[in-house]
Amino acid sequence: MDIATLAALLFGTVLMLGLLFWAGLVRTALFLLTPTEVGLLRARQEFAGQQIAYLHQDQRRLLATLLALQALFTSGLAVVWAMAIATHPYLWPGMLAVWLLAGLLGYALPHRLAPERQYDVLQQSGFGVLVAYKLMGPAIEGMVQLTSWLVRRQPQKGVPPLPQATPATEESTAQTEETGPLDERDLLRSIARFSSIPTRQVMSPRRDMETILATATYHQVLDTINKTGYSRFPVIGAKEDNVVGILYVKDLLPFIEEEDHFVWQAHLRTPLFVSEQKPIDVLLREFQTHKTHLALVVDEYGGLRGLATLEDVLEEIVGDIRDEFDEDERPAWALVRPGVYEAEGRTSINDFCRAISLDPAELDNLRGTAETLAGLLLEVAGHLPRQGERVEAGPLSCTIISASARQVKKVRIKIQPEQ
């Protein structure tokens, strides 16, 4: 065998094996996706995600396309080696080795590798699969229809007949497949917005933080713990924004009987500081990295803005989380009559939007950096609204019920119907 023939044989073998491995990897990765993951990719409005969601619309045709690609590459490999053995019969042991390698690369190995690199594979291969899906469409569609016809022609013994679909059930099924359950759609929408929410929108503001002075006596610390019931406290130094550490109540349990002179400050832990602009998906990863549930939020000048917890982050996805120790707080808003609410100015915009089933994204162009309803009204009005003043904020028509010289205290909100 001359060098040119050997080079052609090696090139054809490597090419077909590579394409066979790629097709197996993509097929496994695509069919590992759950319906919820496909819906999430569609909700994110990313190009690669839209391609994958489009391919999943007809899974029978998608599977047929990928199996046809694998069959095509396997046939190509067979043709290459058939031509080689026709002129060089002594190569048949090499052909057996290549077939074993083809089974490993095309079918066995993708099932091991695809789960670990699923999204990388799909992001890089989605466009190639979409091109093949379109080019092979007519032939594949014909094969799918023929297979369906043959299956329907086969008698199925012992299988009860399927109930006839009525127009009402068809409409209900179509609506369910298109939209999904309400709670699932809300969950997908929350996850899709997760990476775009800054920390400042989920934090507790500085004025609502429970802190302990570094100069407090041990009995004063225990008294604060008993009154508040919290398990972690930021400890403030000489200056108001100077947080010297975080006190974990569990660290004091072995010393509960100590006298007033006990140096509790020696048990402080290093605080985690984060920017108020940090997306909460990044904040969640920092919680995991630093193995903590609490972070102190600072502005661009280093001033203390508030406090964010792991619970605050998770509530942006699943809604309010309460346990048996949480007290029933008086809600910050109330329904006056259908479509009309009264709310305190300090109410979180995100929380209020969830309560009235309004997407917070509709207010993104109006709110600026505001996290509360009072901040939203300040942004829209351009000044501190006075009592009785009316402010239109997108779908919300707001009338100020009470306000002081420094803040909006209470507001009446009417939900405007969609135009």
Image: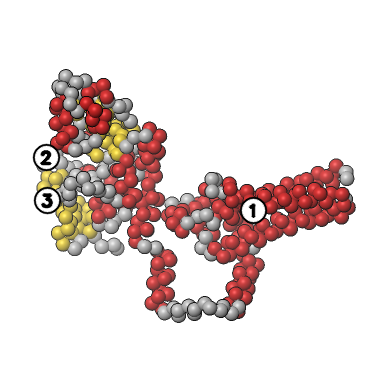
The answer to whether residue 138 is seen in the rendering is: no
Q: Nearer the viewer, residue 66 or 360?
A: 66
**Disc 1: which residue:** 107
418 is higher (above) or lower (below) than 40: below
Residue with the mark numbered 2: 405
Dot 2 falls on a residue whose secondary structure is: loop
Residue type at mark 1: give it. Answer: Tyr
Secondary structure of the residue carrying numbered label 1: helix
Instruction: Point out residue 266 in the picture as x, y percentages from the top left corner.
Output: 26, 21
Q: Is residue 316 visible?
A: yes
Place residue 40 in its image quadrant.
Answer: bottom left
Q: CA distance from mark 2 to mark 1?
A: 72 Å
For label 3, the residue is 401
Please, what is the three-letter code of the amino acid marked with disc 3? Ile
Q: Is residue 315 above or below residue 416?
A: above
Give the left or right position of residue 160, taking residue 153 as reference: left
Give me the residue at 56% from left, 78% from top. 156
The residue positioned 17% from the left and 37% from the top of the image is 228
Horizontal and vertical percent for residue 342? 16, 54
How did the renderer colour the structure?
secondary structure
Q: Quadrant of residue 226?
A: top left
On the rendered structure, is 177 left or right of 198? right
* Secondary structure found at label 3: strand
Kindly report the distance in space between the C-alpha atoms of the residues bearing marks 1 and 3.
Answer: 68 Å
Question: Of the numbered discs in the image, which one, if any, rests on residue 144?
Answer: none
Q: Quadrant of the C terminus?
A: bottom left
Q: Is residue 401 left or right of residue 382?
A: left
Residue 258 occupies which quadrant of the picture? top left
Q: Nearer the viewer, residue 72 or 366?
A: 72
Give the mark nearer the N terminus: 1 vs 3.
Answer: 1
